[in-house]
Image: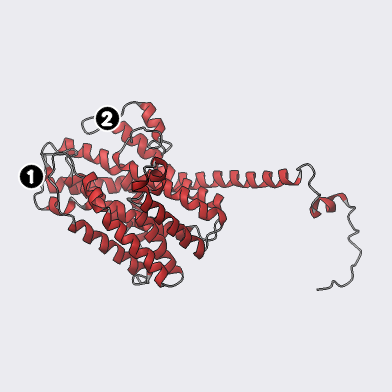
Amino acid sequence: MRLLAAVMVVMYHYVALYGGWDQDPRTIFPSLHQGLQYAWLGVELFFLISGFVICMSTWGRTLGDFVVSRISRIYPAYWVAVLLTATVVSLWPQVRTVAGWDEVLTNLTMLQQGLGVSDVDGVYWTLFIELKFYALFAIVVATGVTYRKCVVFCGIWTAAAVIAPTADNKLLDMWAMPLFAPYFVAGIAFYLMHRYRPNALLWALVLVSLLLAEHHVGKRIADNLTDTEDPIPFWPARLAIAVMFAIMAGVALGAFDRVRWRWLATAGALTYPLYLVHQYIGLTLIHWLQGRMPAPALVLAVLAVMLVAAWVLHRCVERPLGRALRRALQRGLEDMRRQSAADAADAPGRPAHDADRQREAPAAPTHVLTGPTRR
């Protein structure tokens, strides 16, 4: 499903937008354009899956473990993608340019949107949305993930997302994310169904999230239309969102539990690096190669090149660098925990622990036999 979402976004950028084409893509792809102009909904599918997966992966983990897993998962491939994209668009700036290497360095933090700095690649805006979701869900993780806390979290976030558009509060709007919160909340509710069992409370969360997602369709369509495009019907997007929710309901209820094809793991692994590198690098390739082969063949060829690049990025960067970064962060986390325990033990006025008293007391001879202990 993640690969499907990524390919949807790729095809939207290559077929439905001007991007690297010298003419209106509606004239190049008169039939394909009709359907793929809604393929930006792959982003919404990403968020729906993310709510499910993050809730699943944090069960039984500490906050430190959660932070380490997220950093080691999302940053290594991202760092390479930022530098690679910046290099390509600096050498061939026909599609996009960078303001300077200060912008590139800020992008390496993945916090550029919060600092008012442009993204090196247009797709990076979704990563800041994901980071904010991680920060919000970290509150639950810090207190221990439970069924009740997840439901309360979903309820509070839904209420905040409903209030935010009319509250005239930028801070609330930034963190409530009213356009995207319904997908994360529904994903969490679907996972709770999968882990436990469906009930009226969880279905209510899903239904409210679906209705809120449908409510915001008009705004999302407007955000994805250029000034030169005419308004498009809402109903295909509404239908696509309903289908996505229905598929996730099938996942939650076990309808796809028997799907165990080995290649799916590889397909899922390619998703993130494909998403990171496809847009401006792919559009630059389209710009230089258009006219040398039929447009549909060019799109498929560029998609194939991007999939190969994603595989290389996964095997040569994500896996080795991710493991190394995870080990380094875990060592740092262990050092922090050890030192924090030592600082607490050495705090002034704190009574000595049993361990401290045992260290101070003389050790008993090892040959002395003790009597039976009482239970």
> Residue at horizontal 42%, vertical 41%?
171
> Residue at horizontal 41%, vertical 67%?
202
Other residues around mark 2 within 10 Å, as few (<14) / some (14–19) / many (≥20): some
Locate residue 183: give its quadrant: bottom left
| Residue bearing the label numbered 2 | 97
Vertical relation: 185 (above or below) 328: below
Counting from the top left corner in percent of width and height, residue 21 is at 15, 38
> Can you see residue 115?
yes
Apparent side of residue 202 relative to residue 292 in the rendered image (left or right): right
Counting from the top left corner in percent of width and height, residue 93 is at 24, 29
Q: Secondary structure at mark 1?
A: helix
Dot label at residue 122: none
Mark 2–mark 1 distance (CA, rounded to whole Å): 26 Å
Vertical relation: 342 (above or below) 41: above
* Amino acid type of the residue that numbered disc 2 sits on in the rendered structure: Thr
Q: Earlier in the sequence, mark 2 or mark 1?
A: 1
